[in-house]
Image: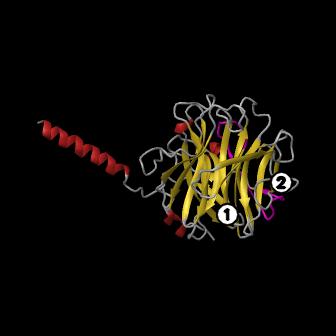
């Protein structure tokens, strides 16, 4: 009897381990998304970097059991994938600092929306993140900068800067890299909430000069995500309602400074997991748009379903972008794989 019980336990453990390693076949928006080790993907407000045939997903690591009010931010978490569906945990690549309250990255700072770009000239991977210093509130928003020679880190904190040519700095942002390598910082300026853009210098470590207001973009536009297709910039963003979702905003332009044309809300459909539709952006907020390499007109929009009371349990919504007459739209899909892009572009 004992021998049979031991065999049953052994078989059960083996089955659980095998289940963890079963490859996923589709992206399922708005539901729990586990990594290849069977744990929830812990990368929030993040973005994607494609480098040497591999995708890297960077986001804020949220500490289990803590709320946003109780300082759940823990640094940058990284995952890697070749198929955008199955993600391997590469660990935390930048940690907040415990025990040194004078450090810019002292634990209990507000650390949000990390984005990583690669500088071909320097060979460095550079992480940017929204940073509010510990105990200083949110009146002044910095951009933090960390550097690594590998996409999987470790990243070393370098410095912070005040963007937007404002003594109060900036809030939510996107980094856009042009084909020639020039990098631009698009952000909401503090305190007036105007949306502005500034060019970074050649090493990407500091703004090069003056920021300019992006003509046509509504004030209080946050959570920006941007992509360039056939000479047209496409900007997906949200309004400003704290952690609560609101209708998405979509703009196009042939220049980063504008004029930008406002197209309203590009979203349609209903998220069956929470019953929310375009009026609440499926319950999410934009974080990033990226190109699917090897797929003509393959673009994916990333959203976070924020749960400020339990941020570790916040969910991810990824949806394919539809293109018609050089305009984007985002339709809810219960699941999809990359073959969706073979028939996705509407002429």
Q: What element carries label 1?
A: loop
Q: What residue is rendered at 50% in x and 63% in y?
A: 338
- The residue labelled by disc 2 is 214
Say few, some or many: other residues with alpha carbon within 10 Å of mark 2 (under 14 / 14 to 19 / 20 or more). Answer: many
Say few, some or many: other residues with alpha carbon within 10 Å of mark 1 (under 14 / 14 to 19 / 20 or more). Answer: few
In which quadrant of the rendered image does the C terminus lie? bottom right
Q: What residue is rendered at 50% in x and 42% in y?
A: 273
Q: What residue is rendered at 65% in x and 49% in y?
A: 156
Residue 210, image x and y in percent? 88, 53
**Which segment did they paint magenta?**
239-261
The answer to whether residue 222 shows anywhere in this view is: no
Q: Is residue 245 magenta?
A: yes
Residue 256, image x and y in percent? 80, 60
Residue 54, image x and y in percent? 54, 63
Q: Which colour scheme is used?
A: secondary structure
Dominant secondary structure (helix, strand or loop) of the stretch shown in magenta: loop
- The residue labelled by disc 1 is 123
Query: Which dot, 2 or 1, sits closer to the camera?
Result: 1
- Residues under labels 2 and 1: Cα distance? 30 Å
C-beta proximity under 8 Å, tags 2 and 1:
no
Q: What residue is rendered at 67% in x and 32% in y?
A: 100
341 shown above or below 63: below
Q: Is mark 2 on a helix, strand or loop?
A: loop
């Amino acid at each position: 009897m004992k021998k049979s019980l031991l065999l049953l336990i052994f078989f059960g453990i083996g089955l659980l381990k095998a289940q963890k390693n079963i490859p996923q076949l589709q992206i399922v928006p708005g539901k729990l998304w586990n990594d290849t080790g069977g744990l929830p993907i812990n990368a929030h407000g993040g973005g994607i970097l494609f480098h040497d045939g591999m995708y890297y997903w960077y986001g804020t690591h949220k500490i289990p059991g803590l709320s946003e009010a109780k300082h759940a931010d823990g640094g940058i978490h990284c995952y890697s994938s070749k198929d955008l569906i199955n993600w391997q945990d590469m660990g935390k690549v930048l940690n907040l600092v415990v025990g040194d309250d004078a450090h810019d990255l002292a634990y209990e700072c507000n650390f949000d929306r990390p984005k990583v770009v690669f500088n071909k000239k320097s060979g460095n991977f550079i992480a940017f993140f929204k940073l509010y210093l510990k105990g200083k509130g949110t009146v002044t928003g910095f951009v933090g900068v960390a550097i690594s020679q590998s996409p999987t880190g470790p990243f070393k904190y370098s410095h912070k800067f005040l963007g937007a040519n404002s003594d109060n700095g900036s809030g939510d942002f996107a980094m856009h890299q042009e084909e020639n390598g020039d990098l631009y910082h698009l952000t909401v300026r503090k305190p007036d909430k105007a949306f502005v853009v500034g060019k970074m210098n050649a090493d990407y470590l500091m703004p090069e000069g003056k920021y300019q207001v992006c003509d046509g973009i509504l004030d209080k536009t946050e959570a920006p995500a941007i992509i360039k297709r056939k000479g047209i910039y496409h900007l997906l963003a949200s309004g400003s309602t704290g952690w609560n979702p609101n209708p998405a905003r979509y703009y196009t332009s042939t220049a980063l400074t504008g004029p930008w044309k406002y197209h309203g809300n590009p979203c349609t459909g209903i998220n069956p997991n929470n019953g929310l539709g375009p009026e609440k952006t499926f319950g999410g907020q934009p974080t990033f748009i990226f190109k699917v390499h090897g797929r003509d007109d393959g673009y994916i929009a990333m959203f976070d379903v924020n749960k400020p009371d339990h941020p570790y349990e916040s969910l991810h919504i990824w949806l394919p972008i539809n293109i018609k007459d050089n305009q984007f739209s985002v339709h809810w899909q219960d699941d999809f794989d990359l073959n969706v892009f073979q028939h996705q572009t509407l002429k």
